[in-house]
Amino acid sequence: MKAQTKRLPISETIIRNAQQTDHNIITNNNIALAWETEQSKLDQNIVAAGVKTAFSDSSKGFYLIAEINGNVAGQLMVTREWFDWCNKTIWWIQSVYVLPEFRSNGVYSSLYGQVLQLARNDGTINGIRLYVDADNENAKRIYQKSGMRKSHYLLYEFDL
């Protein structure tokens, strides 16, 4: 039987740009995300180095943090892909994680709303994409509810 997650009372969700001081929570959330979605056990040192690289090289992307009652409630990362067909950039949402005690409180919607606002204000962004595990029905429902639609593209990969 799955343990019940204690829900915290919600006051206001604040979305902000992540700072280097958020490094540890982002690292830990990424590790939790990999375990929850893929049962992949990630190396903490490698993940920490990856998060540090994103902070030191803005071309890699940026993180947004959701805070509720002064606590980090969730995160996502935005990376960039150049799209030569339209001479604009595609933003990819990655590393989406909402801590269990804050789920079902609109945390992802708040994060996604900030991404949309930033993209619209930027003027050089053609669209926003993300990928989701084919079996993650809950995430697919959340993304569709936020206004995203299933793409006609399939994802192929080759791991080195």
Image: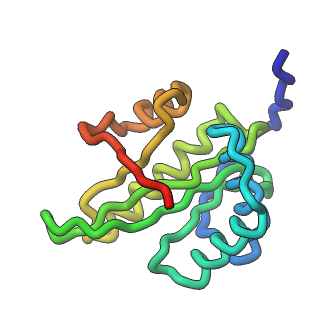
Residue 148 on image: x %, y %: 36, 39
Q: Is residue 114 left or right of residue 20?
A: left
Residue 18 on image: x %, y %: 64, 69
Residue 81's quadrant in the figure?
bottom left
Residue sitting nearer the eye, 43 or 24: 43
Picture residue at 14% right of the left edge, 65% below the top: 86
Picture residue at 61% right of the left edge, 65% below the top: 16
Residue that protrudes farthest toward the front in the picture: 160
Residue 87's quadrant in the figure?
bottom left
Picture residue at 36% right of the left edge, 50% below the top: 129
Picture residue at 13% right of the left edge, 64% below the top: 85
Residue sitting nearer the eye, 17 or 50: 50
Q: Is residue 123 left or right of residue 98?
A: left
Residue 145 on image: x %, y %: 43, 31
Q: Is residue 97 left or right of residue 23?
A: left
Residue that protrudes farthest toward the top in the picture: 1
Quadrant of the snapshot with the N terminus: top right
